Amino acid sequence: MAYDEFLAERLATTFKQKNIAFTVKKMMGGLIHMVDEKMCIGLDRDKKTGEDRMMARVGEAAQKLCMKRTGCRAMEFTGRPMKGFVFVYPEGFDLDEDWDFWVEKALAYNPLAKSSKK
């Protein structure tokens, strides 16, 4: 599992400050923060570049707008972008206001997201 421990603690602290109940699971080579048993935000390291990155589940409607933000790229593992998910690289979340933007986007979409099959 490759992810930055500082970013994981930063994300957990953000959720706690917002009084958001969450669980953490190791999956997809990183750490996923689940809200209401649904993938919300994750952290991992880009295997090609070694850069830390955030995965945000923002939904298909917001995805196109989000892609215009600094540091945001399509989330793909198999060569095809995953609908409703984006990767955000450090230049897109280093500042607190950018970090908060991504957390809020993911939390706003979470009630609309479908739960994964068990």
Image (cartoon, rainbow, N blue to C red):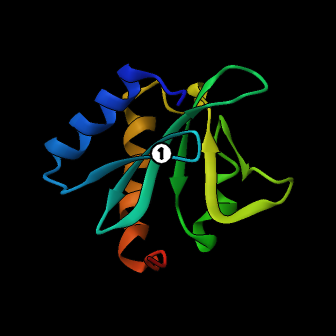
Q: Residue furthest front?
A: 118
Q: Which part of the image, by quadrant, shows the C terminus?
A: bottom left
User: Which secondary structure lies at badge 1?
Assistant: strand
Q: Position of residue 59 (x, y in %)?
A: 56, 69
Query: According to the image, label 1 marks what residue?
Result: 42
From the viewer's perspective, tell me whether residue 68 is left or right of residue 114: right
Q: Position of residue 112 (x, y in %)?
A: 42, 79
Q: Position of residue 113 (x, y in %)?
A: 45, 76
From the viewer's perspective, tell me whether residue 55 is left or right of residue 36: right
Q: From the viewer's perspective, is residue 88 above or below residue 23?
A: above
Of residues 33 and 88, the one nearer the viewer is 33
Q: Which residue is found at the position 52% from the left and 62% from the top?
A: 58
Q: From the viewer's perspective, is residue 42 above or below residue 89?
A: below
Report the number of discs: 1
Hey, which quadrant is residue 10 in on the image? top left
Q: From the viewer's perspective, is residue 75 above or below residue 30?
A: below
Circle 1: residue type: Gly
Q: Which residue is found at the position 46% from the left and 22% from the top?
A: 4
Q: Which residue is found at the position 23% from the left and 46% from the top?
A: 15
Q: Which residue is found at the position 35% from the left and 57% from the top?
A: 34
Density class for disc 1 (Cα within 10 Å; few <14, some 14-19, many ≥20) is many
